[in-house]
Image: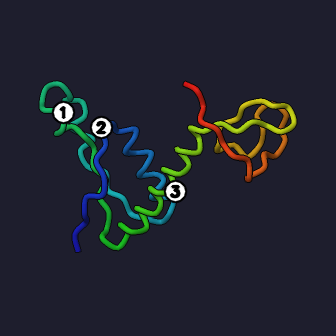
Amino acid sequence: MTRVRFSVHRTVGEARLLAGTLESEGMSVEVRGEALVPLTGEIPSGETWVELWLWPGDVEQARAVMAQLQERQEAAALEVECPACHEANPGNFELCWSCGLELPSGLRPRLRAV
């Protein structure tokens, strides 16, 4: 059985973070292309991107992990106001960063002004 390419990343850091997350979920991840990264600018940039390769049986689980990561990223982009001290908290926080109060999960997050 051969591995399949799961994702392509512009940076080693981005690829390694995802690889570590997938490995922590029990998947075997092969990172390919790291050796070409120092050649960025010397060869076409698409050839220096880093790829993650998985066993075919792990692809569905990896997609589920990616979906969870996307949800968390979207939650972090939202803002939740603490009901006690009225401080703004990222939407993925469980406790208020200012007073330590547990934030209710039912609060409706607002988009954060950037």
Which image quadrant: the N terminus?
Answer: bottom left
Q: Secondary structure at mark 3?
A: helix
44 left or right of 71? left
Q: CA distance from mark 3 to mark 2?
A: 21 Å
> Pointer 1: what residue?
45
Q: Nearer the viewer, residue 23 or 98?
A: 98
Of residue 70 and residue 41, the one placed in the foreground of this image is 70
In the image, is residue 65 above or below residue 113? below
In the rendered image, which quarter is residue 35 located in? top left
Indicate left or right for 76 with 55 as reference.
Answer: right
Q: Residue at x 60, y 39 (%)?
A: 78
Closest to the observer, 102 or 23: 102
Question: Which disc number belongs to residue 68?
Answer: 3
CA gap between label 1 and label 2 equals 9 Å
Indicate left or right for 4 with 25 as reference: left
Residue that mark 2 sits on: 10
Pair 1/3: label in front? 3
Query: Residue 3 location in percent, x, y?
Result: 25, 65
Q: Residue at x 18, y 33 (%)?
A: 45
**Residue situated in front as seen by the camera: 85 or 62:** 85
- Identity, as a three-letter code, of the amino acid under mark 1: Ser
Q: Earlier in the sequence, mark 1 or mark 3?
A: 1
Type of amino acid at the residue the image marks with label 3? Gln
Disc 1/disc 3 C-alpha distance (Å): 29 Å
Question: In the current view of this chain or complex, which residue is farthest to the right?
Answer: 84
Using a 10 Å C-alpha cutoff, classify the residue at mark 2 as few (fewer than 14 neighbours), some (14 to 19) or many (20 or more): some
Say which quadrant the C terminus sits in. Answer: top right
Q: Amino acid at mark 2?
A: Arg
Helix, strand or loop at label 1? It is: helix
Residue 55: name its quadrant: bottom left
Point 18% across, 38% down: residue: 46
Disc 1: CA contacts within 10 A as few (<14), some (14-19) or many (>=20) = few
